[in-house]
Amino acid sequence: MRFFILVFIILPALEIGVFLLSGKTIGVWNTVLIIIFTGILGAFLTKRQGLEVIRKAQDAVRAGYPPGDILLDGICIFLGGSLLISPGFISDCLGLILLLPPTRKLIKPLLIKWFQRWIDKRTIYID
């Protein structure tokens, strides 16, 4: 429940504050252009990296290896692309962090710990 409050109440309020500040600082039209640009960039990067992840996962399965690490990349790319496509400077920063391979390497161990905690609490099942 805390997660939903953060995502649906606090984050949009912060985004609105940053929009107002940036509109006042760099101008309304520059703010709108930046939002449009990051949306297009997010769609482009997500498509490119997403197709690469699909290809790598197929290669791993064909070679007989489980694509676990590759699937984590796919989750990060999907979330990062979704954040970049949605309007907002804070969400754009978070999305870019998830899309860039060097920062994604730092986030994947945190995701593994998070999934492991879900499994340990029996809130998620893997059969």
Image (tube, rainbow, N blue to C red):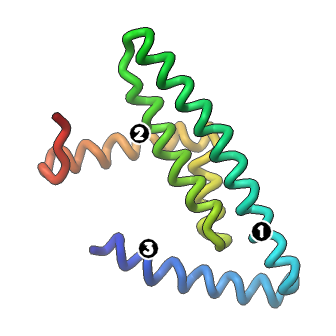
Considering only vertical position in the picture, is 8 above or below 76? Answer: below
Per the rendering, the mark at residue 36 is 1
Which residue is nearer to you in this view: 10 or 68?
A: 68
Residue on which the image places disc 3: 7
Q: Report the amino acid beneath label 3.
A: Val
Mark pair 2, 1: CA separation: 32 Å
SS at mark 1? Answer: helix
Left or right: 117 as drawn, with respect to 99: left
x 68%, y 53%: residue: 43
x 61%, y 30%: residue: 52
Q: Report the amino acid beneath label 1.
A: Ile
**Earlier sequence position, callout 2 versus callout 1:** 1
Left or right: 4 as drawn, with respect to 41: left
Task: Return the x and y of residue 115 as percentages of the image width and height.
Answer: 29, 45
Splitting the image into 4 quarters, where does residue 100 fall?
top right
Q: Report the amino acid beneath label 2.
A: Pro
Left or right: 77 as drawn, with respect to 71: right
Task: Return the x and y of residue 14 as percentages of the image width and height.
Answer: 57, 82
Q: Residues within 10 Å of mark 1 (few under 14, many from 20)?
A: some
